[in-house]
């Protein structure tokens, strides 16, 4: 997968640099980080320690055991310093020291983190070392790392690598036999979470995969949504209530307040927590000068799988117990699927424009891209370069065709947003009306993109 290859190349680049380095690598439990780590460590000398929740004394004993087993060393001083001074590569090559689930080492265990800092500074081990501090807790990318790791180790971190979900293009490559439509729908349901993508069977239809993997009690993703929330967040009843309200169309703080009954300050705290885990995002309307006409304070569920779960399944779980997964799909999912997939299609079109930009095939070099959310309408995608020139796009997933009226509405919204474009892209998963096609042939600033192009 392209993004995993990029992550591996980044780690390899750091490894090949002279001297010691420490990398904080943040990867969710579903990112298949084990395969990335295994691929990177191939043909390298490494020491691996999987931290666990334990007292400082037990943590030391567990680390000592691994040093003895992996490095064939006898330890006697009962210190973290001794552990990290006795690891060995066996030759002059750089040693990779992997400390997995480092968030499980309590911040009160300062001696552990101080020893890692000494290792980074060549105070314990004379040879070259690359230290990988792995965590699956995304909040480590948001909380005060100095408090978590201690000032000494915090100052030694050279790089941070967040292992992101795979792209839509990577998903298409994984599901080579799928049509573009089925690929978009799959992306709208499971997103780019590698573990979920690996569950998908390209030999089955989209509906069959949803029924067998998500709706069936024996499916690998049947409990995935519950686990995703319970793994890191306490008070699931509060998070479930807020997420269900959002999935039901409540996108502003006051809307969520009215739907849940929780106080606004409480909702704000919980939304902040969900944002720290990349579950929720605050949609900041693209600012090009039309701020008075923009809608402010809009939230949405960022995680595609959780958005799908809370939209279609959460409130209907009792029915799922009483009917087959196929009947549930036909009754509760199919009727609203086309409307729901609009959000995924916008994300796919965003990636398409980003790829064109990367290849230099846009009329301007975009440095910023977003969405303008207006009080009366929305511009799905807006791109800006360094001198405030713009491209814009609308994306149609389920309407019969993009019409001349849709194009005129786009121009109206662009005017409200104070955006003057060099070119507009009209993406349609269906088709375009004949008069719009004729206009696009005459006007090079109008680009029509259909499903085949994607």
Image: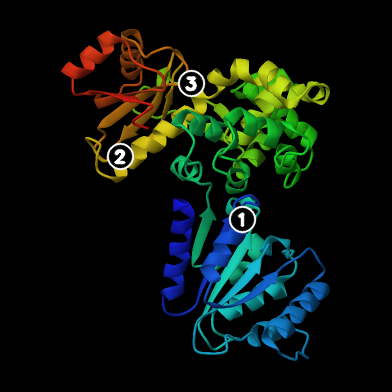
Nearest to viewer (mark 2 / mark 3): 2
Instruction: Identify the image quadrant of residue 369.
Output: top left
Which element is circle 1 on? Answer: loop
Which element is circle 2 on? Answer: helix
- Check disc 1: other Cα within 10 Å, few if <14, some if 14-19, many if 20+: few
- Percent position (x, y) of residue 67? 71, 82
Instruction: Identify the image quadrant of residue 449.
Output: top left
The residue that disc 3 covers is 295
Mark number displayed over residue 152: none
Q: Is residue 384 left or right of residue 135?
A: left
Q: Is residue 304 above or below residue 100?
A: above
Q: CA distance from mark 3 to mark 1?
A: 31 Å
Residues tagged 1 and 2 counted as in contact (Cβ below 8 A): no
Front-lying residue, 254 or 282:
282
Q: Is residue 31 left or right of residue 223?
A: left
The residue that disc 2 covers is 356
- Check disc 3: other Cα within 10 Å, few if <14, some if 14-19, many if 20+: some
Q: CA distance from mark 1 to mark 2?
A: 37 Å
Q: CA distance from mark 2 to mark 3?
A: 29 Å
């Amino acid at each position: 997968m392209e993004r995993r290859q990029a992550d591996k190349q980044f780690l390899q680049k750091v490894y090949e640099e002279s001297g010691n380095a420490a990398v904080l690598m943040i990867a969710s439990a579903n990112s298949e980080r084990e395969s990335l780590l295994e691929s990177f460590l191939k043909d390298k000398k490494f020491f691996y320690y999987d931290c666990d929740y334990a007292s400082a004394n037990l943590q030391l004993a567990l680390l000592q055991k691994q040093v003895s087993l992996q490095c064939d060393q006898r330890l006697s001083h009962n210190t973290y310093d001794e552990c990290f001074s006795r690891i060995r590569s066996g030759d002059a090559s750089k040693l990779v020291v992997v400390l997995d689930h480092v968030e499980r080492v309590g911040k009160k265990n300062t001696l552990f983190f101080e020893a890692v800092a000494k290792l980074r500074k060549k105070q314990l081990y004379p040879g070259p070392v690359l230290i990988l501090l792995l965590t699956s807790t995304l909040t480590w990318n948001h909380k005060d790392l100095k408090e978590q790791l201690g000032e000494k180790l915090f100052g030694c971190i050279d790089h941070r690598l967040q292992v992101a979900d795979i792209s839509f293009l990577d998903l298409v490559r994984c599901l080579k036999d799928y049509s573009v439509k089925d690929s978009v729908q799959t992306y709208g349901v499971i997103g780019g979470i590698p573990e979920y993508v690996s569950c998908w069977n390209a030999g089955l239809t989209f509906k069959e995969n949803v029924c067998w993997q998500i709706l069936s009690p024996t499916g690998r993703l049947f409990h995935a949504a519950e686990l995703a929330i319970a793994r890191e967040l306490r008070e699931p009843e509060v998070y479930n209530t807020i997420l269900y309200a959002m999935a039901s169309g409540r996108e502003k703080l006051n809307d969520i307040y009215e739907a849940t009954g929780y106080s606004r300050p409480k909702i704000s705290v919980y939304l902040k927590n969900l944002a720290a885990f990349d579950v929720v995002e605050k949609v900041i309307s693209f600012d090009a000068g039309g701020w008075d006409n923009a809608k402010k304070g809009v939230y949405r569920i960022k995680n595609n799988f959780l958005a799908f779960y809370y939209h279609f399944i959460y409130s209907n779980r009792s029915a799922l117990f009483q009917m087959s997964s196929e009947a549930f799909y036909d009754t509760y999912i199919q009727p609203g699927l086309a409307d729901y997939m609009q959000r995924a299609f916008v994300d796919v079109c965003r990636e398409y424009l980003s790829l064109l930009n990367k290849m230099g095939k846009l009329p301007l070099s975009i440095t910023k891209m977003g969405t303008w959310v207006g009080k009366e309408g929305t511009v799905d995608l807006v791109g800006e370069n360094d001198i405030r020139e713009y491209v814009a796009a609308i994306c149609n997933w389920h309407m019969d065709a993009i019409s001349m009226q849709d194009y005129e509405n786009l121009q109206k919204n662009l005017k409200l947003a104070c955006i003057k474009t060099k070119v507009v892209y009209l993406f349609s998963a269906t088709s375009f009306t004949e008069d719009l096609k004729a206009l696009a042939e005459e006007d090079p600033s109008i680009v029509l993109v259909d499903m085949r192009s994607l």
